[in-house]
Image: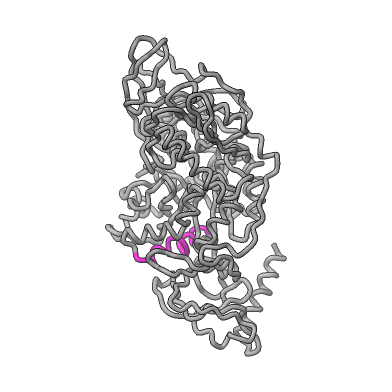
């Protein structure tokens, strides 16, 4: 650490020498751009002078231009601090950090704060460490906030590794780790407190340790108000965030209580338009409003962009462009204590997005630490493909299943069942009761009513449990698809119109060691192998993953009749045990609000 301080002091001395001497000059001058000042929320014409990896001056830089200075004319363009995604999961994109960065950097994202919660559930510390090591190799800034608890609901689901406070000293001191990620054990504070008080004790041991060494603690507070929200805020040490806010009412309450609201706008979870009403309608101060994606698929990154696209959508909701940019620059930098970025001012890192069209957030160029790394959507630097070690590629340890393993038994000719209701573009689900036919003692799905069977198969070889229930909302007319992406414990999820195709798809995922498989009429139609923790591929580029997922989705839509977009991501969240109302785990149908497993068949 002393060596780092000495190095920085020497770099700062060089900046001072350039500014105070007539003999030295800037390396680069961005000439006469429209500077977006997120400190004062204004735009004005100025130069930005860069020396090494730092901003030297924002203002008139004529006297800093020497014979070796590269002068870039940016007249008519806008200069913004590089964008920060404050909460995201690489695993949801199925990409390595390298491939995600390759797709996101050209759209202006220079900092990523990632939660390796997914690989932590699958592999524990070994998976988190592997991801932390890759984060050290990319040109952008990647910080990790790590899980303090896996699984999220002990006793109600099975993870590959049970992370507790005993792991925190090791994990929090991995490189690039800046704190604890979404503190999900308090997502339903009352029921956790009443049913598993030992979880709260363990979480507090983790959070207090994290705070004692200067680390951040993120929150996770869906539908929490009043006393429950207050308890959650206290559990994080008083500086709390939440990326699970879905209504204006929640957003207002949380902002009033000092919570940093991460307004989520990902590929399937779109909550920003509702949350931002607290600003546009109630005129609340937006300093604690932050934009984040949480989960994005590769195709959206490649075709739509990353944080620039989220800012664009926010502007369309009636937010001033500079205010929207504050939500991806100075606001998150303030929350995370990233004092070296988030604003354009002397001594800050020269992480800069050059914007050609402010309303549409078209990014023409990107600087990271004073180096031009992307221009007009093209990456200008080499990023070698990253391959993970074999130690994180053996996470699927369960046996193949039979058709009978997925059957739901009942007596009589008809029976009433509980059924999860999928809500498009939300983590939240509904709860339904439906009447289904019984044939030969087995409850049958009803394709005409869009009532399909789904199952969650424990894949780590720890107990062999299988949860089974029904779901409405996918619209499948035939076949089935399965995947080893199932937030947050990432067991194998499958949904389908018939048992045989469901079992076939599940077994193909097991044989691949993790991935996605689509089956129909007794054969596999399409598949994608995800060897890293059953979540990520290090065998394909980001572009190749984008193409492959697009092909998988076309098969599910056109051959199986699926009616929901991004079906694999939508399915993956139906096991999210901390998000109301009903979910499925390997233990069965989970009533999230009441913290209990419900029988699928009603008596």
Q: Is residue 37 visible?
A: yes
Query: x, y percentage for residue 298?
Result: 51, 49
Residue furthest bottom in the image: 22
- Rendered-image quadrant of the N terminus: bottom right
**Where is 596 relative to 135, above or below?**
above
Quadrant for residue 125, please give it. Answer: top right
Q: Number of labelled discs?
A: 0
The segment highlighted magenta reads: 320-336
Residue at (64, 83) in percent of width and height: 68
Horizontal side of residue 246 vs 392, given as left or right: left
> In the figure, is residue 244 to the left or right of 489?
left
Q: Is residue 589 magenta?
A: no
Residue sitting nearer the eye, 448 or 386? 448
The residue that appears at 44% across and 22% down in the rendered structure is 498
Q: Main secondary structure of the magenta part?
A: helix
Give the farthest residue toward the right.
3
Residue 324 belongs to magenta span: yes
Left or right: 167 in relation to 334: right
The one nearer the camera, 41 or 164, is 41
Quadrant of the frame with the C terminus: top left
Percent across and percent down for residue 82 are 51, 65
């Amino acid at each position: 650490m002393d060596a780092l301080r000495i190095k920085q002091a020497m770099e700062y001395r060089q900046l001072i020498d350039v500014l105070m001497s007539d003999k030295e000059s800037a390396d680069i001058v961005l000439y006469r751009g429209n500077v977006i000042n997120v400190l004062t929320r204004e735009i004005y014409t100025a130069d930005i002078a860069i020396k090494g990896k730092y901003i030297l001056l924002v203002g008139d830089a004529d006297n800093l231009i020497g014979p070796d200075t590269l002068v870039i004319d940016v007249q008519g363009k806008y200069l913004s601090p590089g964008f920060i995604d404050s909460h995201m999961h690489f695993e949801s994109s199925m990409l390595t950090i390298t491939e995600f960065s390759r797709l996101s950097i050209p759209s202006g994202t220079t900092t990523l704060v990632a939660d390796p919660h997914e690989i932590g559930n699958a592999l524990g510390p070994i998976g988190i460490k592997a991801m932390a090591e890759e984060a050290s190799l990319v040109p952008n800034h990647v910080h990790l906030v790590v899980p303090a608890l896996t699984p999220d609901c002990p006793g109600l689901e099975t993870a590959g590794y049970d992370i507790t406070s005993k792991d925190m000293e090791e994990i929090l001191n991995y490189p690039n780790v800046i704190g604890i990620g979404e503190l999900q054990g308090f997502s339903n504070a009352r029921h956790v407190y009443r049913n598993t008080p030992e979880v709260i004790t363990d979480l507090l041991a983790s959070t207090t340790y994290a705070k004692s060494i200067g680390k951040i603690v993120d929150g996770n507070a869906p539908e929490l108000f009043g006393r429950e929200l207050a308890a959650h805020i206290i559990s994080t040490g008083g500086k709390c965030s939440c990326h699970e806010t879905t209504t204006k009412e929640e957003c207002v309450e949380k902002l009033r209580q000092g919570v940093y609201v991460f307004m989520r706008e990902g590929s399937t979870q779109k909550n920003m338009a509702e949350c931002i009403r607290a600003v546009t309608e109630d005129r609340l101060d937006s300093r604690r409003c932050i934009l984040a994606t949480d989960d994005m698929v590769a195709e959206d990154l490649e075709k739509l962009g990353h944080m620039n696209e989220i800012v664009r959508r926010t502007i369309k909701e009636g937010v001033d462009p500079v205010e929207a940019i504050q939500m991806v620059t100075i606001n998150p930098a303030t929350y995370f204590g990233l004092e070296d970025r988030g604003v354009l001012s002397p001594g800050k890192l020269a992480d800069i997005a050059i914007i050609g069209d402010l309303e549409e957030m078209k990014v023409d160029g990107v600087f990271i630490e004073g180096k031009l790394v992307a221009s007009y959507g093209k990456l200008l630097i080499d990023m070698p493909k990253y391959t993970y070690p074999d130690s994180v590629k053996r996470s699927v340890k369960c046996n193949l299943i039979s058709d009978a393993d997925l059957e739901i038994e009942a007596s009589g000719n008809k029976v009433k069942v509980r059924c999860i209701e999928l809500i498009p573009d939300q983590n939240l689900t509904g709860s339904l009761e439906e009447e289904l036919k019984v044939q030969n003692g087995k409850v049958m799905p009803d394709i005409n009513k869009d009532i399909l069977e789904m199952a969650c198969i424990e894949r780590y070889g720890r107990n062999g449990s299988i949860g089974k229930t029904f779901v409405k909302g996918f619209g499948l007319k035939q076949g089935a698809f399965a995947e080893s992406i199932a937030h947050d414990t990432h067991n194998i999820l499958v949904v389908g119109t018939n048992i045989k195709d469901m079992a076939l798809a599940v077994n193909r995922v097991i044989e691949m060691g993790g991935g996605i498989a689509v089956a129909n009429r007794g054969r596999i139609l399409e598949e994608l192998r995800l060897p890293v923790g059953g979540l990520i591929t290090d065998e394909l580029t980001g572009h190749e993953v984008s193409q492959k997922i697009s092909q998988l989705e076309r098969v599910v839509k056109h051959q199986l009749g699926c009616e929901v977009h991004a079906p694999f991501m939508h399915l993956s969240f139906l096991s999210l045990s901390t998000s109301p109302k009903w979910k499925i785990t390997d233990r069965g149908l989970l009533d999230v609000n009441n913290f209990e497993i419900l029988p699928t068949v009603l008596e």
